[in-house]
Amino acid sequence: MRTDLLVLNGSPAPDGQSMFLALKTIEAAGLEAEVIHLSILRIESCTACMECARGGRCPLDARDDMAATRERLHAARGLVVASPLHFTSLTAPLIATFSRLEPEWLAFAAAGFAKPSPEFRNGAGMLVVTGGGDYRAMFEPARRVAAAVFNTLGLLNLGSVEAGHTSRTPVAANTLALKRASAAGRSLRAALSPARRCL
Ligand SMILES: Cc1cc2nc3c(=O)[nH]c(=O)nc-3n(C[C@H](O)[C@H](O)[C@H](O)COP(=O)(O)O)c2cc1C
């Protein structure tokens, strides 16, 4: 079953700052969304056994929740990665999940690292990220990880919605971040509109 939007929530809070901002973005997109809260799943990090590089299946898929998550990732036309900053980057459950995309990365490499073009696309990805602090380039590490994931999955990178200093100003009171979420939701909707789907 294909979904319009899949939200991967990397926060331990199902209703925290990051999900609040993600839900505002989805609301503005007006699309159906399925949310996966990674903190309640068990997904181990890649062990670099390289079975996938030998053409085999990931051995870990048989014993944790990655097989089902992988299936949902492939079924989604739009992917929203929602995360707080934890030690400057995306949270551990997201990093563990993305480490398991090695088979997808190998396919991407075999295809010559082809960039998704706006004319011919599989879908689009967006990062929604919050941080308690307020410092220079604070979202850069998270942006870089998300860009690598979207490229690997063949998704057009639509950028990010970011809210800093959540320790002082909750997202709900951050009017600039909320405005950005609305604009981002509209661009997500435009990118995934049926007229622009890849045939
Ligand atoms: C373990 C941990 C590490 C954190 N590291 C950072 C950080 O590196 N930079 C930052 O700005 N905020 C950091 N924070 C604050 C969170 O990013 C911030 O509170 C966020 O808005 C929480 O979002 P959530 O409610 O969706 O979990 C950290 C919080 C925790 C619990």
Image (spheres, rainbow, N blue to C red):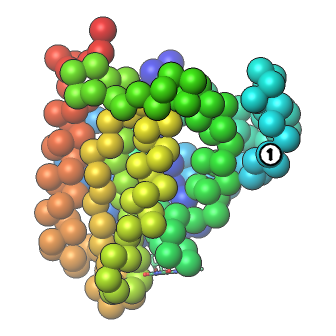
SS assignment at label 1? loop
Tell me which residue sits at (85%, 41%) in the image: 49
Specify the farthest residue to the top: 199
Residue bearing the label numbered 1: 48
Nearest the viewer among 136 and 114 is 114
Residue 142: quarter of image: bottom left
Q: Does the numbered disc 1 mark a residue whose Cβ is under 8 Å from ligand 1?
A: no
User: Is 136 on the left-hand or right-hand side of 196?
Assistant: right
Mark 1 residue crowding within 10 angstroms, few (<14) / some (14–19) / many (20+): few
Residue 39 in the image: state x and y as whole percent. Answer: 64, 59
Tell me which residue sits at (56%, 78%) in the image: 87
Specify the farthest residue to the front: 112
Nearest the viewer among 162 and 39 is 162
Q: Is residue 95 above or below residue 87?
A: above
Q: Is residue 83 above or below residue 23?
A: below
Q: Is residue 64 above or below residue 130?
A: above
User: Is 70 on the left-hand or right-hand side of 136?
Assistant: right
Tell me which residue sits at (54%, 74%) in the image: 86
Tell me which residue sits at (66%, 48%) in the image: 99
Specify the farthest residue to the bottom: 168
**Looking at the figure, which quarter contains the C terminus?**
top left
Q: Is residue 55 above or below residue 138?
A: above
Report the number of numbered marks.
1
Query: Can residue 69 be seen?
Result: no
Query: Can residue 87 be seen?
Result: yes
Residue 24 in the image: state x and y as whole percent. Answer: 27, 56
Residue 102 in the image: state x and y as whole percent. Answer: 66, 38
Residue 45 in the image: state x and y as whole percent. Answer: 75, 52
Residue type indicated by callout 1: Ala
Residue 94: quarter of image: bottom right
